[in-house]
Each structure stands twice: as structure tokens, then as C-alpha cells.
Image (spheres, helix red, strand yellow):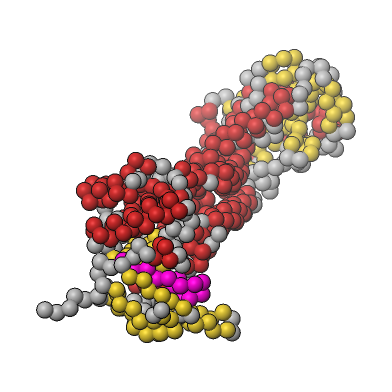
């Protein structure tokens, strides 16, 4: 019977119900989109690292897993690595920031193609001129670029010579020596990728490279990809926790306001229930049930919204952001919205439960 | 043969409201005895204390002093929880403004009273209640929500809700105050019929002498006291 009353109340004040559930949904979307973006971006990085076709990655001494903008490896190290046993192909890259979280990658197209199997061109082809740039499909979509278009970054005008399928190392490429010169890193590299004659020789080859370059960070690609995780990105976990905290506060405020208004609106009804003999626990229970329904409907809406945000990201900024759907986080987001909502219902519920029946019945 | 125990015994009942630093005596030593099966009207002008008496008899307010015994239970100085139990088990209310839950149908309003009283069977499964609904003339309107019912129909549903749990006492506060003459007559006749057919004890508060005339006995109040005109 109480459930019927709760549902009828929610149905009767449907605008308030829809707004409250939507607000809880936005809170859930905030968490799931942030987590989905973090995981998606890292997963995309992993995929692109694997797409380079390398077996081993050599990084400069003391560098962090994510984010490289310097090129401290002398090019002679690359020549040295190429002569080590079991090394079939070795190629060096330079990574340089171009604003925001975006960067451009300088590659030696010949050795990179031998390592990765080469770009799959959707339109256009390889570099022909020093001001040529290759972009992947996502980047082209985000910035509305086509072959032959002019594209300005690093205070220079570039010409798009090719649009390639995504998934190979980066999204934006220019010739290695051009980027080295432009970024004042002539003769220097950011990373070295190594492909072996046979993946079975990985252990032996890594041992040899480690012995030859003791200060450098040497990873197998599998090892490197496993390190690209939320735990290894400084501050990311804390950032997620902050957003969860904010979500709890938002949920609390939304439900507090909604329930507070509901209790005021229903003062007379609460008086009627009390006159009929309803206990304070029954009145409180009614509001708690209503809150739980709002939180659960809001959570479901929030999960649906994340499909919307993923669509919007893929549609408008596929080159900058990648979002994945994170079902593992659905129960956590539901718990966060439930906790925030129940906290928000506490005071209005207490107020309703303590309502004086005579005053409530006289309420107009 | 021993005298039957009265349903209500009120002795020297007083109620003082504090409004800031001012004390207002709403009841100043009320004595009242109501036998089982009586239909009593309490009449008096505004401020005479009849509503306060209604609230105390209904377990909605506590007394400042004196004694109130209903069906053998003293309720003048009960805690909130005990008064809640009294409202649930002993009293059925009929209000001037009907006070039906607006989001529920007439049937659900009646069932809600049953649910709160902890009864599980559907009210319409009991023959006596079906007959009562027939008497009240609302059997065919039970699926409607209050906003679709006329004032008279709402008040008749409220009466059905008040009696569904067989309370020892039905308290009616100006039950015809919001109704036109025709509907007032219908409701008052129904209350009298209920009283005569089922022996339901009814205590009705009104300031309307014509409405009071339907009762067996009229009690007059003025300035917080029962008077004998």
C-alpha cells in the first residue's frame, strides 16, 4: 500500500520526479563519463602503442609512463640498437606538444612502415614535401580536414597529404627530421621502438639491450601496455575521487531540495497519514522508498546518458578524447547516487516524521 | 446488574496552549461521559474549545491536566507513540475538508486506513462493509480519485475510511462544513443511519444547530467549558 502511495506520488508530481531523476542521472553520468574517458584514453594509448608493431620500447632515463615532450635520446643510440642481436627493425620518434593534451609525432616513415606494416591510407598518401602532415581518420573528422587542406600548428602552415586508419602510434605525424629541427631536438629522439626477428627472442633481446643501455627504461610492449593504467597516472585516481565526492554533494543537494519541497507540498497528506495512525517510521519509510526509486531511476538514466556522451565524443572530438562504457563502475555509481540521495532525504524525512498532525492537517 | 462501562469518560480536562510568553486556556475543566452507541453533537461558537476537545479525544493532542478514558484506556497524558496507537486502533476521523489522499483512488484511501491498522484483508470482502458502501452510495465510485468526486461523495468516502477498522469512536469535525444543504442532509442522515444500524459511537463537532439536531444528545461548549443552557 505504501509502495502504491509512493508510486502515485511520483506519478502525480511527474515534473519534479523527472527533474530529480535527471539531476541524479547527470551526477551518475559525470562519474561514468570521467571514468570512461580515463579508461578509454588509456586503452586507446595502449592500442596505438601495440599498433606500432614493436616488441620492445626504449624510453629515456627517468621518464614517466605518460607524457613525453622532450627528446633526450641521442640518435646514435638508435644506430647502436639496430646492430644488437635479434633486432629486425628499430625506429625512433619525437613527440612534441601542440596545445592542450594534444601532441604531434615525428616519424621516419620508411622504418616505421617496415615495423608497423605501413599506414592504411583512406585518402592521399605518404609525405612528399617537408610541410606534409599525415592525420588519422579521427583527427581529420574532428578538425574537418581532407587531403590537400591547409592545417596550422607550431606556428606553421602544413598540408594534409594523407588520411590514415587510426590505431598506429599517434594521430598526427610529420617527418622525423622536420620535427627534430622545429623543436630544437636535432639528432635527438623521444623513444625508440624495436621489432625483433622473432618474438620468441624477446627475453634474450631485452637482456642484451638492458646490458647495453643500463640507465634507459626498457619495456616489452606487453609490459608497457600493462603499465598504462589509472594507477600509474599521477593524480588521476585522486581526480576521480574528487569527482565522486562532488557527485555525492550534488546528489545530496538535489534530493535534499526535492524531498524538502515534497515534504512541504505534502504537509497535509502527512497529517492525514498521522491522523490515520501512521507512525513516524512509516512516514520516514515512505520518503526513503521514494528516494531510493529516484536514485535507481536516476542511475539508470545516468547510464543511458553515458551512451549519449560517448556518441557525442565520437561524433565531435574523436581525435582528442576516447570514452568507453564501464559496466564495472555501474554499481559504484549507483551506490554513490544512493548514498548522496539518502543523505539528502535524511533531514526532510526527519522533518516529515516529526510533523505535528494538527498543524499538518491545518496546512493550506 | 452492573452499569455498562461508558465508552468515553472525561474528567476535569484542561488544556493550556503556550503562545510565546502568553498562556491560552482552551479547556477549563471539562467533564463528559459518552455511552457506547451514542451519537453526540458538541456545539459551540469559535474559540469555545470544541476543536481542542476533538483533538484530545482523537489522540492528536495531549491534555494539560485531567483524565480522558476511552474504551478503558487513559489517554490524557500519553506519549506520541502511544497516541499514534490510539488513533490507529480506537478512533476514526471525519474532517470538514474530507482529507482524502489526493493521489490515491477512493478504494485505496480506504485500504490505506486498513493497511496502517495492520489489517490485510480487502475491505470489500466483508459483507458488512459492502452493505455500508451501498448505504453510503459510493460503491460505484471507488476507482475514482478525490478530484473526480463531488464534495458529498468525498465526505462519504471519508466516512467509509473512518469506520473500516471498526473503531470504538468516530470523531466528525464539522462534517458538513464544506457541503451544500442537500449533501449536508445526506451526510448527516448517513451518520445517523450508521449509528442506528451498527451501533457506532459518533461524536460530532458542529456550530450548526440544524446539523446537531441529528444527534441523540447535544453538548454545548463555551469558553472552554461544557455549559447547560
**Residue B44 among those drawn in magenta:** yes
Q: Position of residue A128 (x, y in %)?
A: 81, 16
At horizontal 46% and vertical 43% (from top left) the residue drawn is B148
Above or below, B211 against A22 in this view is: below
At horizontal 51% and vertical 67% (from top left) the residue drawn is A359
The foreground one among A350 and A216 is: A350
Q: Where is residue B200 in the image (x, y as percent from the top left)?
A: 27, 62
Q: Where is residue A123 in the image (x, y as percent from the top left)?
A: 72, 14
Above or below, A167 against A191 in this view is: above
Picture quadrant of residue A34: top right
The foreground one among B50 and A124 is: B50
Magenta span of residues: B39-52
Above or below, A119 against B15 in this view is: above
Residue B60 shows in this picture: no
Residue A163 shows in this picture: yes
Give the left or right position of residue A317, taking residue A3 as reference.
right
Q: How many marks?
A: 0
At horizontal 45% and vertical 65% (from top left) the residue drawn is B208
At horizontal 76% and vertical 32% (from top left) the residue drawn is A104
Give the left or right position of residue B216, taking residue B3 as reference.
right
Image quadrant containing the C terminus of chain A? bottom right
Amino acid at each position: 500500500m505504501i509502495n502504491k502511495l509512493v508510486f502515485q506520488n511520483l506519478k502525480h508530481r511527474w515534473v519534479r520526479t523527472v527533474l530529480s531523476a535527471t539531476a541524479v542521472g547527470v551526477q551518475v553520468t559525470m562519474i561514468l563519463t570521467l571514468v570512461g574517458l580515463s579508461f578509454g584514453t588509456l586503452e586507446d594509448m595502449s592500442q596505438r602503442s601495440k599498433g606500432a608493431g614493436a616488441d620492445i620500447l626504449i624510453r629515456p632515463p627517468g621518464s614517466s609512463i605518460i607524457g613525453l615532450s622532450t627528446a633526450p635520446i641521442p640518435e646514435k643510440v638508435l644506430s647502436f640498437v639496430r646492430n644488437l642481436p635479434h633486432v629486425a627493425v628499430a625506429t625512433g620518434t619525437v613527440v612534441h606538444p601542440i596545445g592542450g593534451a594534444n601532441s604531434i609525432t615525428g616519424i621516419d616513415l620508411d622504418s616505421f612502415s617496415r615495423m608497423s606494416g605501413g599506414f592504411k591510407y583512406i585518402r592521399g598518401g605518404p609525405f612528399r614535401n617537408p610541410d606534409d602532415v599525415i592525420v588519422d581518420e579521427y583527427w581529420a573528422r574532428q578538425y574537418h580536414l581532407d587531403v590537400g587542406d591547409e592545417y596550422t600548428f607550431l606556428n606553421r602552415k602544413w598540408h594534409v597529404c594523407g588520411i590514415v586508419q587510426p590505431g598506429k602510434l599517434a594521430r598526427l605525424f610529420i617527418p622525423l627530421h622536420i620535427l627534430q629541427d622545429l623543436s630544437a631536438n636535432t639528432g635527438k629522439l623521444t623513444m625508440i621502438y624495436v621489432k625483433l626477428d622473432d618474438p620468441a627472442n624477446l627475453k634474450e633481446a631485452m637482456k642484451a639491450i638492458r646490458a647495453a643501455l643500463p640507465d634507459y627504461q626498457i619495456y616489452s610492449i606487453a609490459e608497457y601496455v600493462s603499465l598504462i593504467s589509472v594507477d600509474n597516472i599521477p593524480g588521476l585516481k585522486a581526480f576521480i575521487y574528487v569527482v565522486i565526492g562532488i557527485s555525492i554533494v550534488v546528489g545530496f543537494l538535489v534530493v535534499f531540495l526535492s524531498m524538502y519541497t515534497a515534504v512541504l507540498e505534502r504537509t497535509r497528506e502527512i497529517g492525514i497519514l498521522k491522523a490515520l495512525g501512521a507512525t513516524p517510521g512509516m512516514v520516514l519509510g515512505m520518503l526513503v522508498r521514494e528516494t531510493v526509486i529516484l536514485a535507481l531511476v536516476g542511475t539508470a538514466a545516468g547510464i543511458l546518458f553515458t551512451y549519449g556522451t560517448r556518441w557525442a565524443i565520437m561524433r565531435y572530438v574523436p581525435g582528442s578524447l576516447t570514452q568507453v562504457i564501464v559496466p564495472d563502475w555501474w554499481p559504484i555509481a549507483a551506490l554513490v547516487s544512493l548514498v548522496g540521495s539518502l543523505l539528502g532525504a535524511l533531514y526532510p524525512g526527519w522533518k516529515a516524521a516529526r510533523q505535528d498532525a494538527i498543524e499538518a492537517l491545518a496546512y493550506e | 446488574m452492573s452499569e455498562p462501562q461508558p465508552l468515553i469518560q472525561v474528567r476535569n480536562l484542561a488544556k493550556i496552549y503556550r503562545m510565546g510568553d502568553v498562556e491560552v486556556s482552551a479547556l477549563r475543566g471539562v467533564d463528559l461521559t459518552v455511552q457506547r452507541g451514542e451519537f453526540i453533537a458538541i456545539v459551540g461558537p469559535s474559540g469555545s474549545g470544541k476543536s481542542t476537545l476533538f483533538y484530545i479525544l482523537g489522540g492528536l493532542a495531549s491534555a494539560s491536566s485531567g483524565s480522558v478514558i476511552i474504551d478503558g484506556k487513559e489517554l490524557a497524558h500519553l506519549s506520541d507513540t502511544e497516541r499514534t496507537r490510539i488513533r490507529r486502533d480506537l478512533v476514526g476521523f471525519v474532517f470538514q475538508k474530507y482529507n482524502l489522499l489526493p493521489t490515491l483512488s477512493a478504494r485505496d484511501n480506504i485500504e490505506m486506513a486498513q493497511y496502517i491498522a495492520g489489517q490485510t484483508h480487502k475491505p470489500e470482502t466483508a459483507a458488512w462493509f459492502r452493505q455500508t458502501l451501498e448505504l453510503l452510495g459510493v460503491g460505484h465510485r471507488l476507482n475514482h480519485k478525490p478530484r473526480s468526486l463531488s464534495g458529498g461523495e468525498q465526505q462519504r468516502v471519508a466516512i467509509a475510511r473512518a469506520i473500516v477498522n471498526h473503531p470504538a469512536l468516530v470523531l466528525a469535525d464539522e462534517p458538513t462544513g464544506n457541503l451544500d444543504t442537500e449533501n449536508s442532509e445526506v451526510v448527516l442522515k448517513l451518520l445517523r443511519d450508521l449509528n442506528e444500524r451498527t451501533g457506532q459511537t459518533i461524536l460530532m463537532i458542529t456550530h450548526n444547530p440544524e446539523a446537531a439536531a441529528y444527534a441523540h444528545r447535544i453538548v454545548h461548549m463555551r469558553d472552554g467549558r461544557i455549559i447547560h443552557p
